[in-house]
């Protein structure tokens, strides 16, 4: 029986664990550094946290949830969903909590991975699967004096629930997907809210709605109805993703919808100008909210587009030298998405270091397999993130492909599977051609490595990825 170790316990990990468990692979071990499963849906608990992909699609195809309370579920409900799926498929008891992996090393003669944890313990497995995600390491900005602030400050992904915003003067740094969700909540309670926005984002209306008891009964009695909603959302999002190519007609339509939303919700021309992006739509992640613009238009809220040059013990100083005294600073400044798997020292065959191989940005065959790293599979790896669409759809496709690789190993009595350099290079060349014609090449965004390579995103719609991963191509790999 092949022993399989999976690092992490977020959606990626659960997707692959369930796929493997359902096909009879029972020697599964999941290692989770925290004390609960859920990944980003466990960690991001800021007020208003939720998913801007509709829940019928942001869920496993084989685990529809007729109990979603609304079309765009909030964090708690999504976290509960992951836990429910993991429990139902017997995954939860396989998780070792408080187990943070620091290193993994390929043992050539034994054809196994030796995995080391922060406490110095080790485990050995035949197959190692990384499912650490792309957005699990919060980043604080490098601003002079940031340590000197004497008020409350924290990152959006490390929300301090003892913090009460009522009557406070608060600075929020950042205006991305997290800020868009949390700012309306803070704006309700704060005496004064300063939103430091370095770049504006395109924002689309969010067709959210609560599911009534009639919806829920229908989803339960006639599951096809929820499948139809899922299919409709998927088809719409596939169209949206097609708008992420250079100069696309769909992109122009998306842009006009976003700018109409801005015109409708923000009447003040000065504020509107501040909120109008000057880059192609989709280059930074398009956001969805009905509440962000109205919050920014409130009297107690100010959008400041000047950079923060210094943090002082009592506030921040902007690029015009104006000092803003605040009681709290909340950093909605995103995550370290550039260096994939950076926190784990991974050594493959011949002593090759994964970090060295990826110095100019991560790349992998189908986002999952790396030459010189036998029996290492990466879930939600390089170029598998989406500019629009459901990551769960992508994760399921990856899980199915990994399951085929393990099945073939066992059926052929092989010990190792390793993608060939030729297959990876040919795949990468084609991928880069597409990426270079995408909107992401035209502005700064978290999808790009500092070398300029777009490392995070899959170019285009999700169907081509599902097709490319549907049937494993044995000749792309060395089996031994
Ligand atoms: P983000 O999208 O990377 O946004 C970070 C924000 O902080 C940006 O506005 C950025 O400005 C700003 N920023 C960074 N460093 C700064 C500095 N030194 N000074 C001033 N501003 C600075 O991070 P996020 O909002 O946490 O979202 C990250 C990703 O998580 C999203 O793109 C999405 O994939 C995921 N997410 C998803 C959802 C969902 O609903 N599905 C919700 C939240 C998050 P620039 O734009 O100029 O860099």
Image (cartoon, helix red, strand yellow):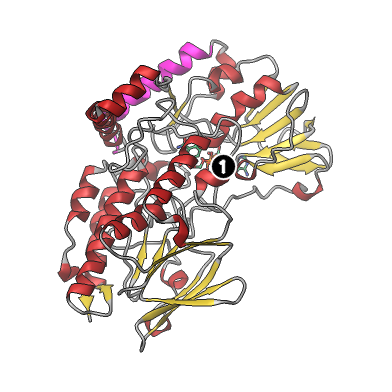
User: Residue 294, image x and y in percent?
Assistant: 56, 16
In the rendered view, would you say 426 is above or below 443? below
Q: Is residue 127 visible?
A: yes
Residue at left offset 27%, top offset 33%: 234
Tell me if residue 254 is in the magenta stretch: yes
Closer-to-camera residue (475/171) = 475
Closer-to-camera residue (418/92) = 92
Under tag 1, what secondary structure? loop
| Image quarter of residue 415 | bottom left
Majority secondary structure of magenta residues: helix
Give the residue at mark 1: 44
In the rendered view, would you say 379 is above or below 121? above
User: Quadrant of the image for the N terminus?
Assistant: bottom left
User: Residue 14, image x and y in percent?
Assistant: 40, 53
Residue at left offset 44%, top offset 26%: 69
User: Residue 336, image x and y in percent?
Assistant: 54, 53
Q: Is residue 477 visible?
A: no
Judge left or right: residue 95 versus residue 374.
Answer: right
Judge left or right: residue 232 versus residue 390.
Answer: left
Q: What stretch is highlighted in magenta?
A: 245-266
Closer-to-camera residue (238/428) = 238
Cβ of mark 1 under 8 A from ligand 1: yes
| Image quarter of residue 361 | bottom left
């Amino acid at each position: 029986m092949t022993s399989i170790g999976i690092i992490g316990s977020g959606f990626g990990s659960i997707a692959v664990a369930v796929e493997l468990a359902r096909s009879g692979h029972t020697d599964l071990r999941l290692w989770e550094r925290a004390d609960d499963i859920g990944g980003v849906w466990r960690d991001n608990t800021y007020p208003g946290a939720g998913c801007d992909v509709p829940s019928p699609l942001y869920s496993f195809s084989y685990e529809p949830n007729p109990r979603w309370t609304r079309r765009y579920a909030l964090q708690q409900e999504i976290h509960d969903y992951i836990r429910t799926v993991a429990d139902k498929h017997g995954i939860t008891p396989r998780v070792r909590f408080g187990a943070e992996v620091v290193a993994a090393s390929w043992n050539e003669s034994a054809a196994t991975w030796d995995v080391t944890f922060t406490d110095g313990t080790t485990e050995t497995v035949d197959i190692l699967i990384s499912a650490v995600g792309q957005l699990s390491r919060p980043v604080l900005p490098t601003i002079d004096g940031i340590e000197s602030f004497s008020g409350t400050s924290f990152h959006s992904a490390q929300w301090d629930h003892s913090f009460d915003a009522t009557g406070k003067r608060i600075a929020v740094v950042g205006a991305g997907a997290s800020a868009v969700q949390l700012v309306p909540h803070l704006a309700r309670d704060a005496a004064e809210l300063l939103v430091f926005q370095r770049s504006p984002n395109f924002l689309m209306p969010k067709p959210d709605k609560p599911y009534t008891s009639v919806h829920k009964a229908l989803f339960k009695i006639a599951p096809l109805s929820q499948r139809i909603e899922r299919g409709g959302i998927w088809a719409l999002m596939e169209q949206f993703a097609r708008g992420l190519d250079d100069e696309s007609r769909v992109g122009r339509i998306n842009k006009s919808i976003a700018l109409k939303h801005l015109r409708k919700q923000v009447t003040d021309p000065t504020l509107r100008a501040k909120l109008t992006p000057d880059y192609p739509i989709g280059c930074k992640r398009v956001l969805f909210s009905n509440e962000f613009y109205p919050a920014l238009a409130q009297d107690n809220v100010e959008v400041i587009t000047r950079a923060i040059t210094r943090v002082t013990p009592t506030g921040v100083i902007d690029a015009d030298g104006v000092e803003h005294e605040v009681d709290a600073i909340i950093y909605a400044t995103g995550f370290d998405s550039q260096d994939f798997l950076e926190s784990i020292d991974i050594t493959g065959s011949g002593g090759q270091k994964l970090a060295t191989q990826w110095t100019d940005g991560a790349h992998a065959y189908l986002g999952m397999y790396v030459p010189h790293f036998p029996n290492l599979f990466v879930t939600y790896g390089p170029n598998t993130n989406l500019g629009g669409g459901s990551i769960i759809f992508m994760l399921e496709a990856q899980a199915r492909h990994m399951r085929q690789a393990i099945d073939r190993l066992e059926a052929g009595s092989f010990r190792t599977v390793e993608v060939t350099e030729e297959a990876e290079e040919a795949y990468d060349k084609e991928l880069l051609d597409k990426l270079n014609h995408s909107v992401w090449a035209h502005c700064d965004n978290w999808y790009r490595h500092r070398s300029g390579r777009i490392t995070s995103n899959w170019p285009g719609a999700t169907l081509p990825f599902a097709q490319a991963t549907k049937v494993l191509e044995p000749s792309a790999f060395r089996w031994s």
